[in-house]
Amino acid sequence: VKNVRDRLFRGMCVETAEFNKVIALFNDKKSAIYALYSDEVGQRMARRTVDETLKYFDEFYRTINDPRKVKREILDACRGGS
């Protein structure tokens, strides 16, 4: 981890099917999460903060929607995994 914005998954291992449910939930909530940064409160935030946050979310969603990245960065990185 190079800085506080780097992600490092160190959660407990669970079955892939369980992670897939969580990924589906994040994907279902994506538009609502992004909308928080364009609503009344989000519009009061510094534009740079909003842009950096949305970029962080973009990277997160790219990761969870790429099966190879999910395997490498989440499933293989869990505590108790191989």
Image (spheres, rainbow, N blue to C red):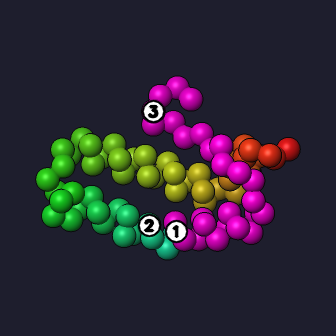
Under mark 2, the amino acid is Lys
Residue 36: which quarter of the image? Answer: bottom left
| Residue 56 in the image, given as x and y percentages of width and height | 43, 46
Query: Could you tell me which quadrant the N terminus lies in?
Result: top right
Residue at label 3? 4
Task: Tell me: residue 35, above or below residue 72.
Answer: below
Q: In front of the other: label 3 or label 1?
A: 3
| Residue 63 in the image, given as x and y percentages of width and height | 59, 51
Q: Residues within 10 Å of mark 2 (few under 14, many from 20)?
A: some
Cα distance in 3D space between marks 3 and 1: 24 Å
Residue at label 1? 27
| Residue 8 in the image, given as x and y percentages of width and height | 60, 39
Segment colored magenta: 1-26
Mark 3, secondary structure of its residue = loop
Under mark 3, the amino acid is Val
Circles 2 and 1: CB distance less than 8 Å?
A: yes
Residue at label 2? 30
On whether residue 19 falls in the magenta region, the answer is yes
